[in-house]
Image: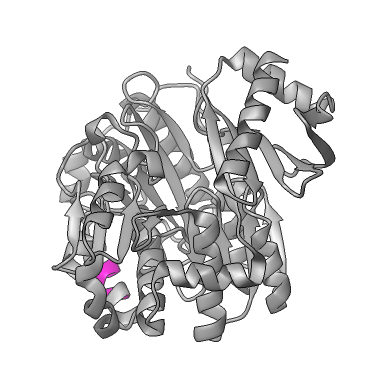
Amino acid sequence: MYKIKFGTDGWRDIIAEHFTNENVRRVAYATSEWLNSSDLPKKIILGHDCRFAGAMFAEEAANVFAAHGIDVVMAKQFVSTPMISLAAKRLNAGLGIIITASHNPPSYNGYKIKAAYGGPATPDTVEEIENLIPDLEITPGYSFEHFVTNGRITYADFESMYLDHCKNSFDMDTLQSVGRNLVYDAMYGAGRNVIPILFPDAHVLHGSNNPGFEGRAPEPILKNLPEMAALIPTSEQYQFGLATDGDADRIGFFDEKGRFVDSHHLILLLIEYLTDYKGYTGKVVKSFSVSDKISKLCEIKGLETITTKIGFKYICEYMVTDDVLIGAEESGGIAIKGHIPERDGIWMGLVLMEYAAKTGKTISQLIDDVYEKVGAFAVERYDLHLSNELKLSIIEDCKSNTYTYFGSYKIVKTEQIDGFKFHLDNGSWVMIRPSGTEPVLRVYAESTDSAAAFAILETTKTQILNG
């Protein structure tokens, strides 16, 4: 049988190649065995996003859960990952499961596991479930319709639950005053109903049904959002550009000038708002690839920082046991105090809009305020699609300390929390790490501006590929 492996955020595979009904049933079987052996409620919240065959795969999983005596509460339509996490907590479930491949290309689907507290399952839980995946075909014995008829499988409206949560948690009058200034790119993803309901006057891009995502990976990064980048500068009306990925747990953002604002800058803005305007305190938990400017701002504010491996499940471990202000990744996954311990692209967008509205400042002005404290900077990234052999060879070179320079940049210190971060003699850094969900080698660089960061990336790319 095909060996199923969970990555940094669930199991993802190519539809019909390895992500099949048979393999979904195997993973659902392992999930059921784990839940039944635990002290948690024997209830699973289940949903799927907008990807191809999501409903079919969700029904396959539900059938297996129900056959194990587990109550399944599932969505009738597509839902976002934050909706499943919120429902798992609100409805006192043992687990939440969503069929999604998040930001991966449209040929992929996936399976994410959410815990009873409303966030990603811990690495230990994921490993335990992975180890229970059987090397045999699973047949539930009864049809999906049988379990619906006898009440083991029921339906609920998780989207309305999420919308009510938003309305009860934000100053909606203030947000409504700037709603017409918002451009939202749904990227054909599972968040596409929420923004039009909250802000009927917002301008929505890619809000229709398209499981192929126009052939574009639904990852909210600059290269995937050309329509928004072109639209905002054409009108003085648009002050905010918000984009969310396929399952709406990641954020992409633009300022009023149509410039992309990366996660590093968004994290800084959120820290400023939560501390200076909300009066919140707590630790800042960040992934290894996040800008060093985050630590600098936290030092100024007297906030403790914790750095984790890549993957929000490592951040979430702290959020459910400690007093955490914000947990954040470079990739656009951010969670904050006052919400569930889960990444949520829409929620972060609402917070940023509220910040700008309450201060009367534009996003670019708020960023300038942060620069006065920590200095200007830029973090850039290359995703190198390499053969597995070359990728492994480069990682081995990193492990064996082969690199002492990248071009003229001298390496003065190396960190290995997750991947390899090389600190350079000019105060910049470059990081090399293989993706946990795609056949990609990621290379990051931070420097004083975008041009300087790209220069480091080019030099590093040339050296690691050519030796």
Eyeballing the image, is 393 above or below 89?
above
Q: Quadrant of residue 86?
A: bottom left
Quarter of the rendering occupied by the C terminus: top right
Q: Tell whether 10 sits left or right of 416.
A: left
Q: Is there any visible trace of residue 71 in the rendered image?
A: yes
**Between 291 and 235, the one nearer to me in the picture:** 235
Front residue of 125 and 188 = 188
Scheme of colours in the image:
one colour
Residue appearing at x 26%, y 56% in the figure:
232
Is 22 left, or right, of 463 in this rendering?
left
Q: Residue at x 63, y 76 (%)?
A: 282
How far across and how far down the image is residue 254, in percent?
A: 37, 57
From the top left corner, tell me how far across and down residue 294 is, in percent. Answer: 64, 62
Question: Looking at the image, can residue 322 be seen?
Answer: no
Q: Residue at x 52, y 31 (%)?
A: 383
Which quadrant of the structure image shows residue 419? top right
In the visual, does 255 lie left or right of 333?
left
Q: Magenta residues?
A: 161-165
Relative image position of residue 31 (x, y in whole percent)? 46, 43
The secondary structure that dominates the magenta segment is helix
Residue 25 counted in the magenta span? no
Identity of the residue drawn at 14% across and 46% down: 208
Report x, y in % for residue 433: 64, 34
- Position of residue 407 relative to residue 161, above or below, is above
